[in-house]
Image (tube, rainbow, N blue to C red):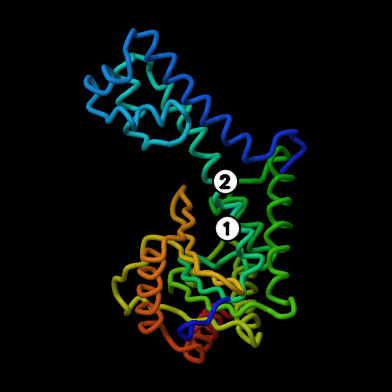
């Protein structure tokens, strides 16, 4: 991107943000009650646990969400089993949901999106492929209890793809790790249709698709998925997603670091033309 160019529901009465705050507040209130029950001041607790007094205060006020290890330490201190860990886990899930919601809002209005993905991203998935992925690739049958939830997620994922066809469409560059293309789903036809869909998506004037081959070796982004998003105005943001976590990043230095890592991966990737030939080769290998 030229220098200077600009560019994650239900019927509950409370909003998701309010629910997140209540769960964090519940954790903080429990920490305060346990401390008072033990007859300790914040200063005494700080001395006996080696955690800073102001840090403990912010935990009790719900202004901070600690690492799991802190809750494990405090559970041991108070002799509460895994009570604090369980409360922390609930609060942590709400924070992740909130960050993902913010990411989804930014994605919907982005003018430029650069992605590095270890799997086929939702924006480029077919309906059947999305259904298979969301149901789990273990081959287990979808039960009546979760089938409706899966179909809702499929509909939401396909709905996100409308942004590729809006006017003006965002400029999208996707770099796919080779593993994303070689890891088949159980139904071969679903997999072939997905590869064909990638070829069709790459023909859109606003989409560039590249493949990062195994021969590129190790790189900075090999452990997580990355999105770099530019709006019409304002600074870019990054969204990083891994196994069970998602983080929205707007710190300029961190975003720049991810931008530089992305540039290195792009330099090592096959060109768009070479990438299309690579995908076509995979289709030929699995031709019935």
Say few, some or many: other residues with alpha carbon within 10 Å of mark 1 (under 14 / 14 to 19 / 20 or more).
many
Relative side of 167 to 137, left or right: right
**Camera-side residue: 52 or 144?**
52
Q: Position of residue 62 (x, y in %)?
A: 48, 31
Q: Which residue is mark 2?
A: 97
**Up-down relation of residue 106 to residue 216 (above or below):** above
Q: Is residue 252 visible?
A: yes
Q: Residue furthest bottom?
A: 273
Q: Which element is circle 2 on? A: helix
Residue at 55 percent of width and 85 percent of height? 280
Residue occupying the far right of the picture: 11
267 lies left or right of 51: right
250 vs 189, nearest the viewer:
250
Of 276 and 36, nearer the camera is 36
> Which residue was labeled with disc 1?
103
Please report the residue visible at 40 percent of the width from the left and 73 percent of the height from the top.
259
Residue at image location 43% in from the left, 36% down from the top: 65
Q: CA distance from mark 2 to mark 1?
A: 10 Å
Residue 104 picture location, percent across and down: 62, 58
Q: Quadrant of residue 283?
A: bottom right
Q: Position of residue 213 (x, y in %)?
A: 39, 78
Whichever of callouts 2 and 1 sits on the residue coming sooner in the sequence is: 2
Quadrant location, the C terminus? bottom right
| CB-based contact (under 8 Å), mark 2 and mark 1 | no
Secondary element at image label 1: helix
Please tell me how many numbered marks the rendered image carries: 2
Crowding at dot 2, Cα within 10 Å, few <14 / some 14-19 / many 20+, comes out as some
- Indicate the position of residue 160 as horizontal and vertical percent values: 69, 64
Q: Is residue 214 above or below residue 149?
A: below
Looking at the image, which is closer to me, 177 or 132? 177
């Amino acid at each position: 991107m030229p220098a200077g160019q600009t560019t994650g529901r239900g019927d509950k009465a409370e909003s998701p943000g309010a629910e997140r705050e209540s769960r964090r507040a519940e954790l903080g209130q429990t920490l305060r009650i346990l401390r008072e029950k033990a007859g300790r001041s914040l200063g005494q607790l700080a001395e006996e646990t080696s955690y800073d007094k102001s840090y403990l205060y912010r935990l009790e006020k719900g202004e901070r969400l600690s690492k799991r290890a802190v809750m494990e330490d405090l559970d041991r201190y108070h002799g509460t089993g895994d009570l604090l860990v369980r409360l922390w886990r609930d609060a942590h899930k709400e924070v992740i949901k909130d960050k993902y919601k913010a990411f989804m809002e930014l994605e919907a209005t982005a003018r430029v999106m650069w992605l590095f993905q270890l799997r086929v991203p939702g924006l480029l998935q077919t309906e059947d492929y999305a259904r298979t992925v969301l149901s789990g690739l273990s081959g287990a049958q979808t039960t009546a209890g979760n089938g409706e939830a899966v179909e809702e997620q499929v509909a939401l994922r396909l709905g996100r793809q409308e942004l590729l066809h809006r006017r003006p469409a965002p400029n999208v560059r996707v770099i796919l790790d080779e593993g994303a293309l070689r890891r088949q789903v159980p139904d071969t036809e679903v997999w072939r249709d997905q590869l064909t869909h990638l070829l069709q998506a790459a023909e859109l004037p606003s989409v560039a698709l590249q493949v990062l081959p195994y021969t590129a070796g190790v790189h900075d982004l090999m452990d997580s998925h990355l999105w770099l998003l530019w709006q019409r105005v304002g600074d870019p943001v990054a969204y990083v997603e891994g196994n069970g976590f998602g983080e929205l990043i707007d710190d300029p230095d961190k975003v720049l670091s991810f931008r530089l890592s992305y540039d290195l991966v792009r330099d090592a990737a096959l060109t768009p033309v070479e990438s299309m030939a690579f995908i076509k080769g995979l289709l030929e290998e699995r031709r019935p």
